[in-house]
Amino acid sequence: MDSGFRALHVSRFVPALQNRGLMPLIVIAVLLGLIQGLGEFLPISSSGHLILAQAVFGLDEPEVAFDVALHLGTLTAVFIFYWDTLLALLRELRFLPGALISPARMKRLYADRPDFRFGLLVLLGSVPTGLIGLGLQDVFKTYFTGTASVGAALLVTGLLLKLAGGRGARGRGDGQLTARDALLIGLVQGLAIVPGFSRSGFTICAGLFLGLSRVTAARYSFILSIPAIVGAAILEVGDGLASRFSTLEFLAGFAAAALCGYLALTLLVRLLQRDNFAVFSWWCWAMGLFALSWSALA
């Protein structure tokens, strides 16, 4: 999912594979979980890749219930990876109700308690994402789901990754994150609803361009993804939960998404620490050129 309000819809693969008798459902469930786990966190645009796959293989429409299960799997990966951070944020945000009715208390907590400040800024950054997702989701789905637009967006993503690759070595830490940073990164996350724009890539790059350290930019990006993924799951549940998958297959897809997502998240954070974030630009450029070529030939 490149934006919290654009579902990955990896289950487009299900009817094509199953109807052709290529593999049993439980294998399909595991493969889709792996795709979800990789695409959720690596900055290569999962929705863009899935649209290309749909164009090339003529894949069918998604299955909502299974998509939600996979989203929950990647959420689990974020919870495990950032468990200590999330626990600290939850402890601090218990003060939020009282702070909302007392501006002086809010100001004091914001200034003196770094975890309260970080958690509050995650909530603040979720506002522009939610407004864009709810207001413009249908527009983006209508006008930006062709292979040509996906190709162009992937090229832009690759360029952004390349430009941001050398930034953040001595940037600002968690305690220096500002409301302006939160709003701008949340805005960028909302714009990543466009297929081919990577949510993780755009938000981390935005943080780096704003002067954040790589570790802080990544931490804020992935924790900011939690409300977005939850919002996407809620929107999808409204479309119905009928499923061809059994309970065992749901669990297999969930586990694969969680495990692969955790590994992808670990890989990306390590690459950021070593200043190799731009390595993904080459893949985005290659797939972008492929998408444009496919569109022209089609």
Image (tube, rainbow, N blue to C red):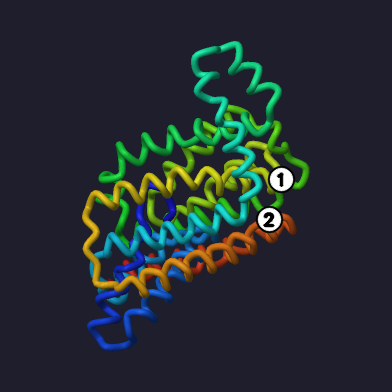
Is label 1 in a helix, a strand or a loop?
loop
Q: Quadrant of residue 49?
A: bottom left
User: How packed is label 1: few (under 14 Cα within 10 Å), some, or many (20 or more)?
Assistant: many
Q: Quadrant of residue 266?
A: bottom right
Q: Are marks 1 and 2 in contact (CB under 8 Å)?
A: yes
Residue at image position (23%, 83%) is: 19
As rendered, which of 278 and 115 lies closer to the eye? 115
Q: Quadrant of the N terminus?
A: bottom left
Q: Is residue 162 above or below residue 253?
A: above
Is label 2 in a helix, a strand or a loop?
helix
Q: Quadrant of residue 15?
A: bottom left
As rendered, which of 135 and 237 lies closer to the eye? 237
Residue at the disc numbered 1 = 168
Q: In the image, is 209 to the left or to the right of 158?
A: right
| Nearest to N terminus: mark 1 or mark 2 | 1
Residue at the disc numbered 2 = 272
Q: Is residue 89 above or below residue 282?
A: above
Residue at image position (64%, 21%) is: 109
Image location of residue 56, percent across then percent down? 31, 74
User: How far, Cα to Cα, is label 1 from label 2?
Assistant: 9 Å
Amino acid residing under circle 2: Leu
Image location of residue 14, percent across then percent down? 29, 74
